[in-house]
Amino acid sequence: MASFIIEGGKRLEGEVVISGSKNASLPIIAASILSGKKTTLYNVPDIHDTQVTIKILKYLGCKVKKTNGKIEIDTRYIKRNDVPDYLMREMRSTVILAGALIGRFKDASFSYPGGCDIGARPIDLHLKALRELGVDIQEEHGYIKCSADKIVGGNIHLDFPSVGATENAMLAAVCAEGFTTITNAAREPEIVDLGNFLNCMGAKVRGMGGSVIKIEGVSKLHGAEYTIMPDRIVAATYLAASAITGGEICLKNVNPRDMGAMLHVLLDMGVQLRIEKDKIIQKAPKKLESIHIVRTMPYPGFPTDIQSPFMALATVARGTSVFIENIFENRFQHIDELTRMGADIKVEGRSAVVRGVNALQGANVVARELRGGAALVVAALAANGTTTISGTEFIDRGYENIEKYLLECGAKIRRE
Ligand code: EPZ
């Protein structure tokens, strides 16, 4: 496993241009299957998860051409609609291909996606939504076979506003016969981006961003050109990286309107923010204030994906912070590693009580999943001494060239 070696204590100052959103790119790349035409996407981050999704599209028979952040996808010649186990297991969100394959071919088979270290990641809500659209689903030997004579619009109610289940329902419904309503839909900005992309292809999706999405099925879709939204979690991670060092940072190509809950927490911790249309300038105090209590919630609540990087901030803040993780059942794995660096954190079920310490100490730590790994990078930037973080492959899943941007802001970081 490769490692990051970080020498802490350097004040981070500078500019970072934020990449396109991983969690918008994945469903939008999958959605290109629906048109059977050519799609051009801009601002796609070049990270492991988008690379895997493109690998699967190529396996299915798509032609894909990548030049920097631009991706040209030709889905005219798809010759299969099954995703093999070894590809499904490469990441959790491969399940998003299901809705696209079913939406186009009314027939798809795939294995249960790999769970991951943050939780079991069931797909019962995805399957319930597809059944509501008339899809017959047979599960055998870990494989899921979906088929439908035709896909008929229906009324889908999600017991939980699942991001992935909302996306799969949208993908399967845009070419269904008739109208589909999705109630208790996820409201994340990535859902809005997917809906906007589908409408660019000629779909008729309304209400995304709210809890009720209405879709009028159309007979076919055409190719499209589309620019992926900025990654709000990557943006907040860089704000945390600078804030923990008492630094000053300017983020470009961001959408502050997607980041309300996160920005409010940073303000409560004592940073100063200047917000412009697609820019955030943050100036942090030498010592941050604790966060009284943070609950992770579906959007527009505080995002679960930023829980661990912000917990790293809280470890050296003045006072005690409480984090309650309501979305995933196993998203505290970074805590053992932060403790090795001198953090004072007590876990009670889904709650973590973080008592701020004067400073963290550099140590050898292990990244076990994407955002927990990002939290260790944030912590290491402020720790006294050198920290070695092994498991960079987890961090590379969601952060493009993280060491390049941190180096440009004055961090002492190298990859070995
Ligand atoms: C998406 O995952 C994101 N991934 C996650 O980001 C993010 O943390 C999550 O949404 C919540 O915002 C992508 O978009 C690729 P969910 P997803 O379905 O769709 C339960 C990152 O770090 N659930 O909203 O898998 C589930 O167990 C990743 O970038 C069911 O019970 O999340 C969880 O407790 C991590 N049954 C909750 O819902 C289902 O069928 C939220 O899951 C589906 C989900």
Image (cartoon, rainbow, N blue to C red):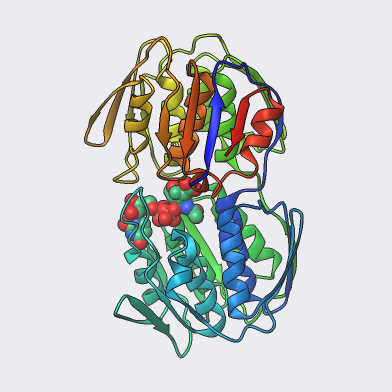
Residue 72 position by quadrant: bottom right
The spot of residue 160 in percent (x, y) is 34, 54
Who's the residue at 35% across and 49% down the image?
117
Give the quadrant of the C terminus.
top right
Who's the residue at 34% across and 70% down the image?
128
In this view, 179 is above or below 230? below
223 or 250: which is nearer to us? 250
In this view, 232 is above or below 80? above
The spot of residue 278 in percent (x, y) is 72, 35
Residue extending furthest right?
A: 67
In the visual, does 357 lie left or right of 299? left
Who's the residue at 63% across and 34% down the image?
256
Residue extending furthest left?
A: 348
- Answer yes or no: is residue 293 visible: yes
In the visual, does 365 lie left or right of 258? left
114 or 74: which is nearer to us? 114
The spot of residue 102 in percent (x, y) is 50, 79
Q: How many marks?
A: 0
Residue 34 position by quadrant: bottom right
In the visual, does 403 lie left or right of 253? left
In this view, 39 is above or below 79? above
Who's the residue at 54% across and 50% down the image?
397
